Image: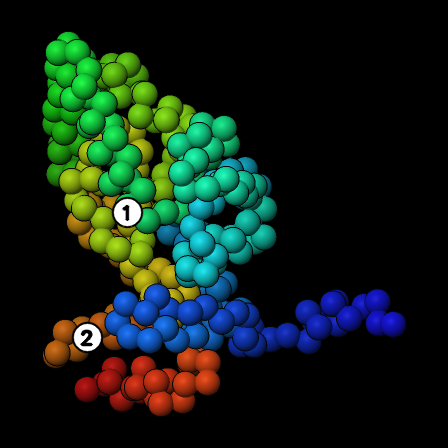
């Protein structure tokens, strides 16, 4: 009876209206429903575009999704496809991610550290079971890559010999790891838990850049993120453009941003405890 109801509803919305309710993990207490607005979502996606720049290509990225959409990173990933026109592919199951990576050949993935920890363990396990020659070549490749990236992280030129040696190893010995992820993966957005510095540095040598970030369900995912141009393993990167951060005297992280939720669903006391307008000026 109302064929234009959807269009009318969309036009009647404002950026501060409720977009979704996403529940916290419950690791620090009972799960609570964080009320997130359209402004929260677009602030995160808009800032990610600003800091990643040309690394995000509208209408050209291919994703393989395996995170639950009940998780804030999975929820953000699911919405990014509508905003940027990316192609989303769904993994058959967690057990079949390896097969799906080769089938889909994603260009970007949203993930958690455990995926790369498990992958690195499998790579090292296969190397240990291989021939002495293969083990030696793998060790030489890692050492060449470590020297190459060590120079780059200090802002120094790796030199022709080091660059050439690492390039050869990457195209031969190390290329198998990138192939296992489909061969087209340019970087991974990672969060939800701390990423080991060793894991991050090793995968960079293997040809996959892991960009770790920090955020909460209450901030609609990242408020800080490493980028392709500016990344340092063992950190969560720089604050996103809209975000202001202060550390209180007791060590609590204080945030001010358009990404911050409006409150917990039907939890007035918990909402009051989460916000302190005076804290920023103490």
The secondary structure type at the circle numbered 2 is: loop
Q: Sequence-wise, which precedes: disc 2 or disc 1?
A: 1
Mark 2 surroundings: few (<14), some (14-19) or many (≥20) residues within 10 A: few
In front: 243, or 189? 189
Residue 252: image tag: 2
Which quadrant, please, contains the N terminus? Answer: bottom right
Farthest residue, direction right = 1
Q: Is residue 67 visible?
A: yes
Left or right: where 12 falls relative to 221: right
Give me the residue at 47% from left, 75% from top.
Answer: 35
Indicate whether 136 appears above or below 188. above
- The answer to whether mark 2 and mark 1 are in CB contact below 8 A is no
The secondary structure type at the circle numbered 1 is: helix
In percent of width and height, residue 64 lies at 47, 40
Total numbered circles: 2
Left or right: where 20 falls relative to 261: right
Give me the residue at 16% from left, 22% from top.
Answer: 128
Residue 162: image tag: none
Q: Is residue 54 visible?
A: no
Give me the residue at 20% from left, 27% from top.
Answer: 125
In front: 39, or 201? 201
In percent of width and height, residue 177 lies at 31, 25
What separation in Å lies between label 2 and label 1 (alpha carbons)? 24 Å
Residue 113: image tag: 1
In percent of width and height, residue 216 lies at 34, 66
């Amino acid at each position: 009876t109302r064929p234009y109801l959807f269009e009318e509803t969309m036009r009647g919305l404002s950026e501060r209206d409720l977009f979704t309710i996403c529940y916290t993990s419950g690791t620090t207490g009972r799960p609570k429903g964080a009320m997130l607005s359209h402004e929260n979502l677009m602030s995160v996606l808009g800032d990610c575009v600003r800091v990643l720049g040309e690394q995000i290509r509208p209408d050209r990225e291919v994703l393989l999704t395996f995170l639950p959409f009940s998780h804030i990173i999975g929820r953000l990933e699911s919405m990014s496809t509508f905003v940027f026109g990316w192609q989303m592919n769904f993994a058959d199951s967690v057990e079949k991610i390896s097969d799906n990576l080769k089938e889909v050949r994603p260009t970007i993935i949203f993930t958690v550290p455990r995926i790369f920890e498990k992958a690195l363990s499998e790579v090292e396990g296969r190397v240990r079971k291989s021939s002495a020659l293969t083990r030696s070549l793998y060790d030489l490749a890692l050492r060449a890559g470590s020297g190459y990236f060590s120079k780059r992280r200090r802002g120094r030129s790796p030199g022709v010999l080091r660059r050439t040696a690492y390039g050869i190893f990457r195209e031969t010995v190390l290329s198998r790891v990138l192939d296992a992820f489909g061969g087209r993966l340019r970087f991974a957005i990672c969060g939800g838990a701390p990423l080991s510095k060793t894991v991050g540095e090793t995968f960079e040598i293997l040809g996959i850049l892991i960009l770790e970030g920090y955020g909460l369900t209450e901030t609609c995912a990242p408020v800080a993120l490493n980028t392709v141009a500016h990344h340092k393993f063992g950190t969560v990167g720089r604050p996103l453009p809209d975000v202001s951060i202060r550390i209180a005297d007791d060590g609590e992280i204080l945030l001010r941003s358009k990404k911050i939720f409006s409150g917990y669903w039907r939890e007035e006391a918990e909402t009051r405890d989460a916000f302190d307008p005076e804290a920023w000026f103490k």
